[in-house]
Image: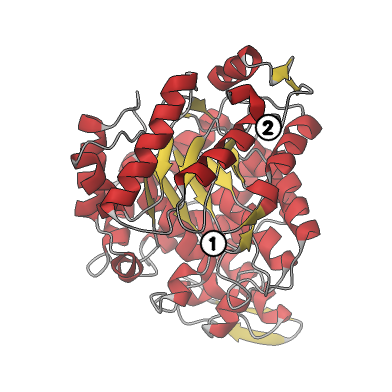
Amino acid sequence: MKLSCVIKGQHFQFQTVKEVLAKASEEKSGDSMARVAAGSSLERMAAKVVLSELTLKDIYENPVISYDTDDVTRIIYDDLSQAIYKKFQGWTVGELRNYILSLSTGEDQLKQLSRGLTSEMISGVAKLMSSIDLVMASQKIKIQAHCNTTIGEKGRLAFRCQPNHPNDELEGILYSIKEGLSYGSGDAVIGVNPNIDSVDSVKKILTMTHDFMETWQIPTQNCVLAHITTQMKAVEKGAPMALMFQSLAGTQKGNDAFGVSNNILDEGYNLMQRFGTSTGPNFMYFETGQGSEVSLDAAHGVDMQTLEARTYGYARHWKPFMVNNVSGFIGPETLYDGRQLIRADLEDLFMGKMHGLPMGIAPTYTNHMEADQNDQEIGGMLTTLAGANFYMGVPAGDDVMLNYQDTSFHDDASLREMFGLRPLREFEKWLEKMGIMENGKLTERAGDLSIFE
């Protein structure tokens, strides 16, 4: 295994595969803060050259965190198809990149191939791709899942209606739900981030959203994004829940900080099989994002992109209905500006889809980042072009409870119209019945909350 190269007369020697992966990453402030980033653009290029010549077997035999010490590594390796891995183990990372980009469509081939790739391999190939490469590669893969609606069908783009309220006032949440639905947002899920992580509060929100969905016969699913253990207790007390949520990290130490483990996720999944209100078979909703492990001091010297890929390798074990990254949610200490944010969104979408996950994107940013709405809109357009399954729908694009910026109900409608995409099939029929949409376009009744009187 060769870990060195010469560029412009300079000799670059790397010590480990982990170091090569880290220094081959595009520039990100979180990697610099963690002191794993390349020291110069020339060193970054040298790392990319070395990475391109490593075989998949080299990466397989050198996980960035040991199998013996980390649950995430164990899930990734235990779930791997050994037959598929052994078929391709002699390929270099560069050959894998060329193969992915050479396929005319490649959906079936890439879905099969992904079952034999570790998360570090997928991270590695993404590091060798330009932004255009990432869009082209992502377009080749479409991943479907079913909860009450089917997400990921060709020509469809879904949205999570995110009706958060600063103090979980049910009436305020309901007004935001109505507004989102009136603009065609909510076919992915009606998902509320609670300010109060208590069983009683979560149960009240779940009951209200479920009853509203039942009253108006809305084909979607409800979710309250409390900690998974709070949700489980609410379900055990009879709360009607269609989709169970949890934030995940790419290391066991990171998941420990989130208060989550394999056993807890297994218990939540089994509980949804028995008592969840959705059809299934996909009942889980995971959120991830580059930088969470760095902010939790749980990165183990691994770069943010590779840790994000490992999060996807972990997530796919529970066959989720939705996975979305919120990479800009932390702030400039992990992604400094709009350029870094957009690159992370493109990487995450490709890596998630290569893991066989039904990926959405939240091109979020905080107000103390060097980013603005233009960056967010560019990120949204590029990842829609690349085939994201869903986005957030936030009133006016400004989350008044979480204090960050995300895509608005109006952005959602614009993305659909711009790319000729339609809501999820079951939900579009409901929108037409309500007079909100006709022939895939919003009608003049869009935004009229009197529809629900």
Q: SS class of the residue under badge 2?
A: loop
385 or 267, which is in the foreground?
A: 267
Residue 275 at x, y percent in the picture: 22, 31
Answer few, some or many: residues within 10 Å of disc 2's Cα (few below 14, many 20 plus, some between 14 and 19). many
Measured along the vertical axis of the image, is residue 173 above or below residue 423? Answer: below
Dividing the picture into quadrants, the one containing residue 136 is top right
Answer few, some or many: residues within 10 Å of disc 1's Cα (few below 14, many 20 plus, some between 14 and 19). some
Residue 70 at x, y percent in the picture: 27, 66
Measured along the vertical axis of the image, is residue 357 above or below residue 331? Answer: above
| Amino acid type indicated by mark 1 | Leu
Which circle marks residue 70 in the picture? Answer: none
Of labels 1 and 2, earlier in sequence is 2
Q: Which residue corresponds to mark 2?
A: 183
Separation (CA) of disc 1 from disc 2: 22 Å
Q: Quadrant of the C terminus?
A: top right
| Amino acid type indicated by mark 2 | Tyr
The image's colouring method is secondary structure
Asked whether, in this view, residue 317 is left or right of residue 434, the answer is left
Q: Are marks 1 and 2 in contact (CB under 8 Å)?
A: no
Residue at 70%, 83% in the rendered image:
40
Asked whether, in this view, residue 339 is left or right of residue 170, the answer is right
Residue 351 at x, y percent in the picture: 54, 50
Q: Which residue corresponds to mark 1?
A: 402
Measured along the vertical axis of the image, is residue 88 above or below residue 127? Answer: above
Could you tell me if residue 82 is visible in this image?
yes
